[in-house]
Image (spheres, rainbow, N blue to C red):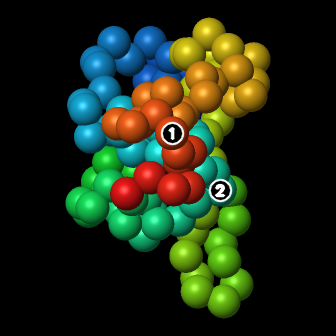
């Protein structure tokens, strides 16, 4: 591929890719959206499964990005991108629905969920 075509190919792959996200990818994306910046290890702890390949997929699709690397642990922390906001049709993460009503008992926030 020629470097002068990089932008066009990237735009097509990131915005025109019609394939849907798996349930695992959607769950991981939700955790990152609500808890960002967050490390892959913390996401794995919340979901109780390995999320390495899912995170790679989300980065590859341009929905999340590396925000910073923790200087003490070396863990990469992830956050969502503007492309995700565009795909969701929102202007800001502040427009995401409040999470408590989505929890099983609806009483506690994300921080207190089991």
- The crowd level at tag 1 (other Cα within 10 Å; few <14, some 14-19, many 20+) is few
Identify the residue at horizontal 53%, vertical 65% (top origin): 39
| Quadrant in which the N terminus is drawn | top left
Relative side of 4 to 10, left or right: right
| Quadrant in which the C terminus is drawn | bottom left
| Quarter-of-image position of residue 96 | top right
Is 2 situated above or below 90? below
For the question of whether residue 13 can be seen, the reply is yes
Identify the residue at horizontal 75%, vertical 17% (top origin): 91
Residue 7 image point, x, y percent:
61, 26
Count of marks, rendered view: 2
Contact, mark 1 vs mark 2 (Cβ under 8 Å): no
Q: What SS does tag 2 mark?
A: loop
Q: Of 53 and 30, which appears nearest the observer?
A: 30
Residue under pointer 1:
107
Q: Of 41 and 15, which appears nearest the observer?
A: 41
Q: Return the residue found at the far bottom.
A: 72
For the question of whether residue 10 can be seen, the reply is no
Relative side of 97 to 26, left or right: right
Q: Of 96 and 83, which appears nearest the observer?
A: 96
Q: Which label is found at residue 37?
A: 2
Identify the residue at horizontal 48%, vertical 45% (top origin): 31
| Quarter-of-image position of residue 77 | bottom right
Residue 88 image point, x, y percent:
56, 16
Is 20 situated above or below 107? above
Which label sits in the foreground, 1 or 2?
A: 1
Identify the residue at horizontal 58%, vertical 82% (top origin): 74
- The crowd level at tag 2 (other Cα within 10 Å; few <14, some 14-19, many 20+) is some
Is 18 situated above or below 13? above
What is the C-alpha distance between the residues marked 1 and 2?
24 Å
Q: What SS does tag 1 mark?
A: loop
Q: Which label is found at residue 76?
A: none
């Amino acid at each position: 591929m020629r470097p002068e075509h990089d932008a066009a190919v990237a735009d097509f792959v990131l915005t025109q890719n019609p394939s849907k996200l798996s349930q695992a990818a959607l769950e991981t994306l939700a955790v990152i959206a609500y808890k960002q910046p967050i490390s892959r290890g913390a996401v794995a702890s919340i979901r109780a499964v390995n999320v390495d390949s899912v995170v790679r997929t989300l980065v590859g699709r341009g929905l999340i990005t590396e925000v910073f690397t923790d200087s003490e642990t070396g863990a990469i922390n992830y956050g969502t991108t503007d492309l995700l906001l565009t795909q969701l049709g929102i202007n800001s993460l502040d427009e995401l629905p409040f999470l408590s009503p989505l929890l099983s008992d609806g009483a506690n926030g994300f921080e207190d969920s089991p």
